[in-house]
Every structure is written in C-alpha cells, then in structure tokens.
Amino acid sequence: MKFSLTLILSSLVLFSSCSSIPNQDNAKPKLQLNIQTSNKNKEIIIEALLKDNVTFSVNFNDEDSYILKDDVLNSNLKYFCNSFLDDQRKILEKRIFNSTINKGKKVLVIYSNSFKGIYSNLVEKYPEHEYLFVDDVNYELQIKEVLNVDSSFDKYLQISRLYEGGEILHSPRIRNDIGIIYFLTNYEFGKTIVPIFRSYALGIDFYASTEIFHEANDIKKLVDFENTYIPVTTELISDISIKETSSIKEEIENILIKDLIDIEKIYQNNQFREKIIPTSGNSRVQRSGCINRDLTFWEVTTLNIIDQT
C-alpha cells in the first residue's frame, strides 16, 4: 500500500510517541535514524520502518547527518564499500575479461547511447576486445555484420547453386573468435536485441547487469534474456518475484534501503552474532570494515523464472 508523505509523517509522530508507554516490549530493537534524502526515499524509509518490528525515531532535518542520494542504485550506501551498480560492474569486468573464463577469445561489448561512459572506460582498459554501438534503427543489420552472419549465408548460396541434388540444410556459422557477449543497454532495447543475438550466437555466454531489466514490471518478462548471466543474489530475485511493482528498479531501490535500515539496526543494537546477510549481497554484516556484496551470477532461464512465481 502506498501512503502520501504527509500521512506517513503524521503516523510517524504518533508511533514515535509510543516509546514512553511503560508496558512497551523492551526486547524490541530500537532505532534512531538521522538521514537526509529525497521525498521519494523518505517514503520508502518510513514504509519500511512501519512494517518492521522495531521501536524507532527518525530525523530528516539534521544537516550534519548521513546523506542518501536520490539515485539509490548508484549511491555508496552507508556501511557498503561500493554502490549496488558498481559492485555489479566490478564483478562483471573481472569475470568476462578473464582469459581463463573466455578461453582467450574476444569479448564483444554491445552498448547503447546511455552507456557510452562505461564503454569509454572499458575500451581504454581492454582495447584488444571488440565494441559495437547499436542504434534503434539499423540494429538487425549491425548484429548480422558484427557476427559475420551475412558471410555465412553468402557461402551457403554459392554452394546451393553448385549442388543440384536437393535442399541443403543450413545453420549460419558466425565468427569463432568471440567467447562472451556483454550487453550494456536498457530494458526496452535489450529485450529487442538479446533474442536476435541468441538466435545466431549459439554457445556464446551472455552477460549484463540488472540495468538490462530495470524497467520491466514483471519478473516473467525476463525470459527475453534467457541464459544471460546477471550479478545478483537469488534472494533479491525471489523477493522481487512476489511483489506487484511498476518496475523492477523500484523494488531494487526498496530492497537497498531496507538493507541500509537493517544494517543500522544491527549496529545500534549490537546484533552482529546473528550473522545477518543483506538481501542485495552475499557477505554477512561485520563489526569492522565496509561490506563488499561479493555477488555471484544468476542465470536467467525459463525454469528458474517460473520457480520464483
């Protein structure tokens, strides 16, 4: 259920005043939250706190408090070493440009307009690999050209003219120097081009960050990215799968803010012995040092999408 910010803040005042009631549950964790952030994030924080089993007070007006940027996915949340998207990009880069994983073959990076900054960084570090800017006009021709699909069809036609004994079965053979395809694109464009690549690039591993499906509003729509490896926890995917949402990005933001609240609660109530692991990562919360999410790869398949619902 969505609340207006005014109603939520009114409820918060009433809820906070309950802390002076003598018969309250003293075993309940307590939380004092001082934070500066946008109205959007304030609503998420208050909704999360009202659902939680915690006695809390929250102050959004302390100018010396922690600042949570509106763009939660690109923010270094308190206690974490990197932003959620930076953690993904780091493990993607480590994995796909590893010669052991891609068996010494090239990585083909497919990027669209909004990802030119990431492309520039990668091409500077890994110039020996191949990069293709794909637009929304000539994308099918661009895909065929980069994979040498047309060359394969031309050879098939030449052989067909020489052979008069009947039909020749043909599956296009693409270039064999590509081991991995890395997609840097949003959902609207990704759901169009990834299936085309899959139809030609059999046996090649696909990788992407969660950005490729942020705008999707149903986890079942991820079937467009079948067999693509995404650096995300299965717990996060499971959590999203049971929610009704306008976008997956919105639910990821909710989860990240809930992680922040849960970790703050651990610190303030000395709950480190409980070995709690944030939903957005695989590393437990520890008393010292920032949290590295230590992400692993989730493979999108029709089966495990169905299993989440």
Image: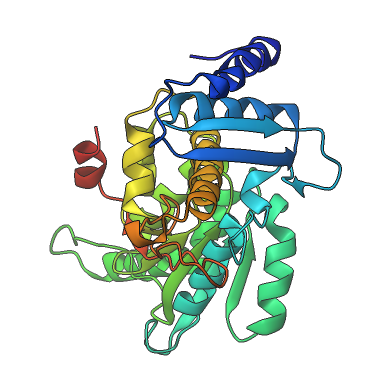
Quarter holding the C terminus?
top left
Q: Is residue 70 visible?
A: no
User: How many numbered marks have been drawn onto this rendered protein structure?
Assistant: 0
Q: How is the image coloured?
A: rainbow
- Residue at screen point 54% across, 18% down: 18
- Quadrant of residue 302 within the rendered picture: top left
Q: Please identify the residue farthest to the front as the structure is shown.
A: 22
Q: Is residue 211 above or below residue 168?
A: above
Q: Is residue 290 above or below residue 13?
A: below
- Residue at screen point 71% across, 50% down: 114
Q: Please identify the residue farthest to the left as the structure is shown.
A: 165
Q: Is residue 21 above or below residue 166?
A: above
- Quadrant of residue 25 within the rendered picture: top left
- Residue at screen point 67% across, 17% down: 9
Q: Is residue 298 visible?
A: yes
Camera-nearest residue between 270 and 226: 270
Residue 175: percent from left, percent from top? 42, 76
Q: Is residue 302 left or right of residue 179?
A: left
Q: Is residue 129 above or below residue 289?
A: below
Q: Is residue 195 left or right of residue 132?
A: left
Camera-nearest residue between 90 and 107: 90
Camera-nearest residue between 18 and 279: 18
Q: Is residue 78 left or right of residue 207?
A: right
Residue 82: percent from left, percent from top? 62, 64
- Residue at screen point 35% across, 38% down: 239
Residue 14: percent from left, percent from top? 61, 13
Q: Please identify the residue farthest to the right as the structure is shown.
A: 63
